[in-house]
Image (cartoon, rainbow, N blue to C red):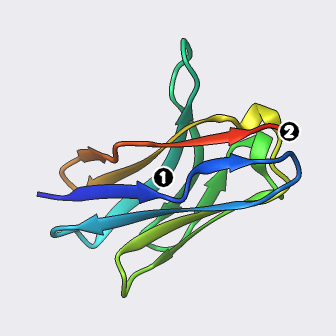
Amino acid sequence: QVQLVESGGGLVQPGGSLRLSCAASGRISSSYFMDWYRQVPGKQRDLVARITSDNNTHYADSVVGRFTISRDNAKNTLYLQMNSLKPEDTAVYYCHLLTLPTPRHYWGQGTQVTVSS
């Protein structure tokens, strides 16, 4: 069974930076997607950034140029470096893993990011 544990959220002023981490434990297949999603109350959970097992990345238009997704395979950890943060980035951020070829979804518990002066 795979478990995902996020950390690194908090309160930051507009223009500031945060780095989120997602530590994965358990057996992960060699083919997968790892993502960061975010959700605000009353709205759907939206994809922020994705990295595949062959290192392809994808970003939501709203974060291009500001956020960077990366992973450390030796540590089984996914990261999201968030720079130039805006109040509209305020949300609960979730780590997600989709393993292949048989699709299986795993979610972390979420970490709150608040951007406010």
Q: Nearer the viewer, residue 47 or 10?
A: 10
Whichever of labels 1 and 2 marks the residue nearer the N terminus, that label is: 1
Q: Nearer the viewer, residue 68 or 52?
A: 68
Can you say whether 48 is above or below 23 in the image? above
User: Which residue is the extreme one toward the left?
Assistant: 1
Q: Please report the residue visible at 18 percent of the width from the left and 51 percent of the height from the top.
A: 102
Q: In the figure, is residue 88 to the left or right of 32? A: right
Quadrant in the rendering for residue 8: bottom right
Residue 1 at what x, y percent from top left?
A: 11, 57
| Residue to which mark 1 is pinned | 35
The CA span between labels 1 and 2 is: 28 Å
Residue 19 at what x, y percent from top left?
A: 62, 64
Q: In the figure, is residue 104 to the left or right of 90? A: left
Which amino acid, mark 1?
Asp
Q: Disc 1 vs disc 2: which is toward the camera?
A: 2
Which amino acid, mark 2?
Ser
Q: Nearer the viewer, residue 28 or 11?
A: 11
Q: In the figure, is residue 40 to the left or right of 24? A: right
Q: Nearer the viewer, residue 107 or 113?
A: 113
Q: In the figure, is residue 88 to the left or right of 55? A: right
Q: Are marks 1 and 2 in contact (CB under 8 Å)?
A: no
Residue 93 at what x, y percent from top left?
A: 52, 42
Q: Please report the residue visible at 69 percent of the width from the left and 43 percent of the height from the top.
A: 60
**Which quadrant does the C terminus fall into?**
top right
Tell me the tag on residue 117. 2
